[in-house]
Amino acid sequence: MNILVTGGAGYIGSHVLKALLKEGHQVVTFDNLQKGHREAVIGGKFVEGDLSDQKHIENVMAENKIEGVIHLAADSLVGESMENPAKYYRNNFANGINLLEAMVKNDVKNIVFSSTAAVYGEPDQIPIKEKNQTVPTNTYGESKLFFEKALKRYDDIHGINFVSLRYFNAAGADPEGEIGEAHDPETHLIPIVLQTALGIRDKIYIFGDDYPTRDGSCIRDYIHVNDLAAAHVLAVEALGAGKESSIYNLGNGEGYSVKEVIDTVKEVTDRDFEVEVAKRRAGDPAVLIASSDKIQQELNWQPEYPELEKIISTAWQWHKSGGF
Ligand code: UFG
């Protein structure tokens, strides 16, 4: 298929791009390079552009005879979204509408959307299923949920079929070592612990050890970025073959605490470093674990790297090599 990937120069987007190229798809990456890296776009065609410019998106779709869209471009810092909500409503919601309008103009009928577990907020049930309540506790999650609602409307009104993928905690790096996670600023646990192992940071802070969990620290469901990427390929191909719209969780169904992640990093890297307990970070739910049964059953998705040790070791290879 001819596929437009927005945000293809980012961490998850670059892994999606590589997976699509391996399957023989023709890919156009559309990215404003605000957070993404030009070096991460390892093939296909690259267009530097911003989703605020609807005309530009329309032209790119027409010139490249786009048949499907994978939409990952977004701002994704939960903390920032609670200081500057306008940025999140504009970039993640309003600019997403430009993309949908450009699809309507070009008669593009398929879109895979990069959503998030943050749409659930404080979960009412563990493991979380797609039909559980969605009450986001931050603007980031809300902006993603609003766009999911827009997708439903564009399906009803314009016949655009969508798959929304609600990621849990993306981690790891492509084992071939070409691409990996390189955020600035970095806020995610695993890369921060790895930077501490490398001596780039003095110590790692555990944000709260008084949660109602087995060791008091928060529990998350970590999923390898290549397993996420594979799900995008399955989803866009299924849409291309006529699949109707769906929402799927993407996680491993297994939770690890912050302390367990730190211990695993110490084992994998064979390095010791200082760990300090700090106060809770605002808005962190105690436990987030996905049920991914639905995508396993309906799209036959199977994670290739479900083990935390493997996820961390691929990320470690990347960080040790110095990244981009
Ligand atoms: N944590 C620490 N110390 C750190 C960094 C993180 O203890 O230095 C803790 C956090 O408090 C949390 C856990 O490690 O309990 C994981 O934190 P991350 O920031 O890596 O990930 P989050 O679970 O907060 O958020 C991720 C994505 C969001 C998405 C969310 C959905 O980054 O974009 O999952 O669940 F919204």
Image (cartoon, rainbow, N blue to C red):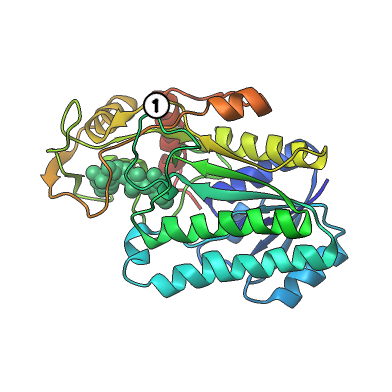
Q: Estimate the x, y position of residue 297 in percent, counting from the top left.
A: 62, 23
**Can residue 161 be seen?**
yes
| Residue at x 75% of width, y 68% of height | 102
**Residue assigned mark 1:** 308
In the rendered structure, the answer to whether residue 128 lies left or right of residue 104 reads: left
**Can residue 198 be seen?**
no
Above or below, 243 against 88 in this view is above
Q: Estimate the x, y position of residue 7 in percent, counting from the top left.
A: 60, 58
Q: Estimate the x, y position of residue 168 in percent, counting from the top left.
A: 44, 40
In the rendered structure, the answer to whether residue 304 lies left or right of residue 163 reads: left
User: Quarter of the image holding residue 23?
Assistant: top right
Q: Estimate the x, y position of residue 324 in percent, counting from the top left.
A: 51, 53
Disc 1 C-beta below 8 A from ligand 1: no
Looking at the rendered structure, the number of numbered marks drawn on it comes to: 1
Above or below, 247 against 158 in this view is above
Classify the position of the N terminus by image quarter: top right
Three-letter amino acid code at the position of disc 1? Leu
In the rendered structure, the answer to whether residue 100 lies left or right of residue 65 reads: left
User: Quarter of the image holding residue 232?
Assistant: top right
| Residue at x 43% of width, y 22% of height | 307
| Residue at x 58% of width, y 60% of height | 73
Tell me the SS state at disc 1.
Answer: helix
Above or below, 169 against 213 in this view is below
